[in-house]
Amino acid sequence: MDQTRLPSYISSENIGPWRIFLHQIEQVAPLLEPALHPWVETLRRPKRSLIVDVPIRLDNGEIAHFEGYRVHHNTSRGPGKGGIRYHQDVTLSEVMALSGWMTIKNAVVNVPFGGAKGGIRVDPRQLSLAELERLTRRYTSEISSMIGPDKDIPAPDMNTNAQVMAWMMDTYSMGEGRTVTGVVTGKPLALGGSLGRQDATGRGVFVTAREAGRRLGVALDGARVVVQGFGNVGEASARMFAQAGAKVIAIQDVSGTVYNPAGLDVAALRSYYAANRSLLGAPGTDALGNEEFWALPCEFLVPAALESQINRYNAGQIDARIVVEGANGPTTPEAEAILAERGITVVPDVLANAGGVTVSYFEWVQDFSSYFWSEDEINARLDRIMTEAFNAIWQLAEERKLSLRTAAFVIGCTRVLAARETRGLYP
Ligand code: GLU
């Protein structure tokens, strides 16, 4: 498909993630089987969206209010599934987009879930641990009508973690009068969490990068890797690239960029980051400006932070062979067209970062059966699912001359809309 001819609204300065999601649906709609066309509108309309006020008492005695959201984009294939994000820029339309991407992602890796997402507009760094717990518990209580182990299962996302999931699980369980471990995934191991979940998204990024490299003749050994983000996804994928013999030459996070052309010591950076809450100044690294970061020649570029990081301003400078989207929505449509023109392959978010929700699915299954698998088994199953999903998308992209993103959307949307069509319209 000609991605260089974009509708004019895409060229506006900042179209936001929901418009980008709608644009992706427009791209894929004509490629779907005609029988599914009447149902495409379903994807343009989230099934239900909840906005909640989350008041909490601060440690100093004052009361503060935060706005929270939970969106079920689609539940045609099963209960809603998707993370909870705490960030000062969270909006309803961002959560809608993230829930839409979850619908596609869950269908791409064929886990039996619909798409959902939640979030609170809060800068969690400004809160104490006790305030964060009160915020999480009140938010969980406010969205309790939306969630449940066979209804909608939250998980960690940006700035939420296993501890936050433990508080959510406990709050929901108190309301139910029994322990319901399956209501959230990404929990601590002691509370029905799964081995391998912590690293799962990064592992999936690594597996899809490996497969893309295999197809394009880019060896991992000695490959230069540039990573944006040093959270759960960026850190784990950087570590796995390094273990496979690649050189992680630069990592950027909110504090800045660290660079070493001979390859960064990812394990040492992790300890440094844990102690200093910043990458800058880590031994054996140089600082690098933002523009130089995006222009670094590399084989793999992994955006693993926020949306729209690869955009019209930096896409022309990017000198990577393969972009692997660890984040959700990191590349704008305009940037994607520029990358395509320049022969840079993009492994899309709905495939590349699906490892997290895939192991969330394993966790949910383990909780239901109260039977827990070994880490080797989990990693092997994850690798298999990601590789099979990659192969199916690659093959379709070749056959129909599509970008990997459009091919992924064809597969994902077909699964969702076929389920929708077969279920039929109620009443
Ligand atoms: N927040 C992750 C994502 O964006 C994981 C969601 C989940 O495990 O439900 O895919």
Image (cartoon, helix red, strand yellow):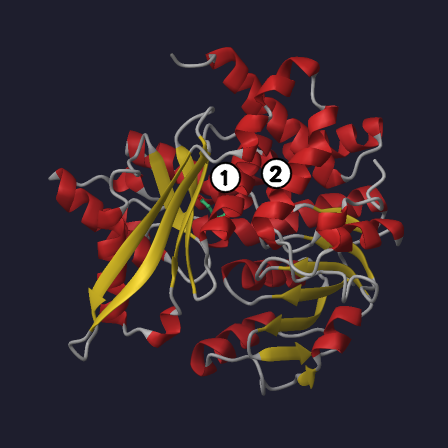
- Decide which of 225, 94 is in the foreground and name it: 94
Q: Quadrant of residue 301?
A: bottom right
Residue 150 lies, in percent from the top left, at: 32, 30
Q: Badge 1: how crowded within 10 Å, few (<14), some, or many (20+)?
A: many
Contact between labelled residues 1 and 2, with CB atoms less than 8 Å apart: yes
Q: Secondary structure at mark 1?
A: helix
Residue 389 lies, in percent from the top left, at: 64, 33
Residue 178 visible, this orientation: no
The dot on residue 349 is: none
Give the amino acid type for the residue marked by disc 2 in the picture.
Met
Give the amino acid type for the residue marked by disc 1 in the picture.
Thr
Residue to which mark 1 is pinned: 358
Residue 220 lies, in percent from the top left, at: 75, 55
Q: Mark 1 vs ligand 1: CB under 8 Å? A: no
* Quadrant in the picture for the C terminus: top left
Residue 75 visible, this orientation: yes
- Residue shown at 57% from the left, 33% from the top: 109
- Residue shown at 14% from the left, 45% from the top: 174
- Residue shown at 15% from the left, 76% from the top: 61
Q: Secondary structure at mark 2?
A: helix
- The mark nearer the N terminus, 2 or 1, is 1
Q: How many marks?
A: 2
Specify whether 411 is left or right of 306.
right
Q: Mark 2 vs ligand 1: CB under 8 Å? A: no
Specify whether 169 is left or right of 420.
left
- Decide which of 329, 222 is in the foreground and name it: 329
Q: Badge 2: how crowded within 10 Å, few (<14), some, or many (20+)?
A: many
- Decide which of 167, 72 is in the foreground and name it: 72
Q: CA distance from mark 2 to mark 1?
A: 9 Å
- Decide which of 306, 196 is in the foreground and name it: 306
The dot on residue 386 is: 2
Outermost residue, right side = 342
